């Protein structure tokens, strides 16, 4: 039995046959790039600008690259999300609610496969074309991100069904590689990897991308268990998932310690006692999180929400203040 999606059904009115699906993609898939890829790209760009002593002439000299990076960061993730919808369509058809959210379940698209090709190839062509404007390194980066995101959903690799790999690949293609893209706008890769503070924030971006995927898995844990999905959270079970969740938050908070140790200009500027207190405070923050988390005992949902609160209120604030204090 066909799966009908009223919200994106192709119109029978001549000249309107592609418009409804196009609008749906703009509202629901380009928004993904705007909310995730674009911010992480800006994060990488601002981090590198801070390392370069906020030399704003770099923005003026690289304005075309910045525009290209913005277009890439907004268009790249929609392909990865759409390819996931494409390969999940046969499974989503079995569930009415999921089928209604997946435009590849539409009988109209199934009858006109060229529409699916247009939807999938457009962001690929756009991303690769604009990456050439920046440099050859960006072309390789975008190509690698596309491949990684493609095989996250596509067989035979299908990383989303391989425990641990589902988290690592998401941490790379959804955040870490976009952060690196931001840095490549103004600085070659060979110099980026020689900057300890850039690497600290790059690692933080990757861990945050892993956390985003794992948190999403934890929300759907019961449903995925019923469906016997081979995700990290399902394979690990509730108790081990709680430990991994705590480990991810502690890892993000630990980057604060590395930041304080590696930020030589800041350590030279502040008195030794202030530096020592700051480093001790970063460890105390980790201890405080663990104490509060263990006080919640086995209340799985509260532990997840508390971890999300810590990430939102401490990790993000640290990123903003940390960039401003790089030099």
Image (spheres, helix red, strand yellow):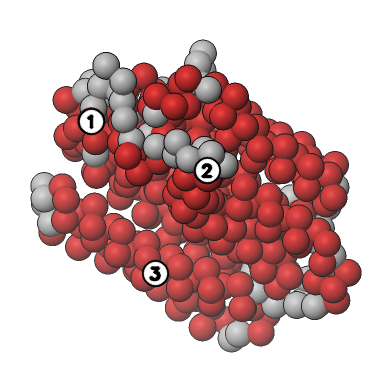
Q: In which quarter of the image is residue 90?
A: top left
Q: Distance between the residues labelled 3 and 2?
A: 48 Å
Rendered image: mark on residue 96: 1
Report the disc number at residue 314: 3
Counting residues from the start of the chain, the first of labels 1 and 3 encountered is: 1
Quick one: label 1, few (<14), some, or many (20+) residues within 10 Å?
A: few
Query: Which of the image's four quarters has the C terminus?
Result: bottom right
306 versus 21 height, above or below: below
Label 1 sits on a secondary structure element that is: helix
Q: Position of residue 183 (x, y in %)?
A: 72, 57
Report how many numbered discs are placed on residues in the image: 3
Q: Residue 177 carries which label?
A: none
Q: Distance between the residues labelled 1 and 2?
A: 26 Å
Asked whether the beta carbons under mark 1 and mark 3 sit within 8 Å of each other, the answer is: no
User: In x, y percent, where is residue 281?
Assistant: 40, 73
The residue indicated by pointer 2 is: 16
Could you tell me which residue is drawn at 57 percent across and 81 percent down? 272
Residue farthest along the top direction in this orientation: 156
Pair 3/2: label in front: 2
Left or right for 232, reference 192: left
Q: Which residue is drawn at 45% across and 36% down?
A: 12
Mark 3 / mark 2, whichever is N-terminal: 2
Residue lying farthest front? 14
Few, some or many residues within 10 Å of mark 2 (<14, 14–19, 20+): few
| Circle 3 crowding by C-alpha within 10 Å: few under 14, some 14–19, many from 20 | some
Residue at the location (11% across, 50% down)? 299
Which residue is nearer to you in this view: 69 or 243?
Answer: 69
- Report whether 304 appears left or right of 164: left
Query: Dots 3 and 2: beta carbons under 8 Å?
Result: no
């Amino acid at each position: 039995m066909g799966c009908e999606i009223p919200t994106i059904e192709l119109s029978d009115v001549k000249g309107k046959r592609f418009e409804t699906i196009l609008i749906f993609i703009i509202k629901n898939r380009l928004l993904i790039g705007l909310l995730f890829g674009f911010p992480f790209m800006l994060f990488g760009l601002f981090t590198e600008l801070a390392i370069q002593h906020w030399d704003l002439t770099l923005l003026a000299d690289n304005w075309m690259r910045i525009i290209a990076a913005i277009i890439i960061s907004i268009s790249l993730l929609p392909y990865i999300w759409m390819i996931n919808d494409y390969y999940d369509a046969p499974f989503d058809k079995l569930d009415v609610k999921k089928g209604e959210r997946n435009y590849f379940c539409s009988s109209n698209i199934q009858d006109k496969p060229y529409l699916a090709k247009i939807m999938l190839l457009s962001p690929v062509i756009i991303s690769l074309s604009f990456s050439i404007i920046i440099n050859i390194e960006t072309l390789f980066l975008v190509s690698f991100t596309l491949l990684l995101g493609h095989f996250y959903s596509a067989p035979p690799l299908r990383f989303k069904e391989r425990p641990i790999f589902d988290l690592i690949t998401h941490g790379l293609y959804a955040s870490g590689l976009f952060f690196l893209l931001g840095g490549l706008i103004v600085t070659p890769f060979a110099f980026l990897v020689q900057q300890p503070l850039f690497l600290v924030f790059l690692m933080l971006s990757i861990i945050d991308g892993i956390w985003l995927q794992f948190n999403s898995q934890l929300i759907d844990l019961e449903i995925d268990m019923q469906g016997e999905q081979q995700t990290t959270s399902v394979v690990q079970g509730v108790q081990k998932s709680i430990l991994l969740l705590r480990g991810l938050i502690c890892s993000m908070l630990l980057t604060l310690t590395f930041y304080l140790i590696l930020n030589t200009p800041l350590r030279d500027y502040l008195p030794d006692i202030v530096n020592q207190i700051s480093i001790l405070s970063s460890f105390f923050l980790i201890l405080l999180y663990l104490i509060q988390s263990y006080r919640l005992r086995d209340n799985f949902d509260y532990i997840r929400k508390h971890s999300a609160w810590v990430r939102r209120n401490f990790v993000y604030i640290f990123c903003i203040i940390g960039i401003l204090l790089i030099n």
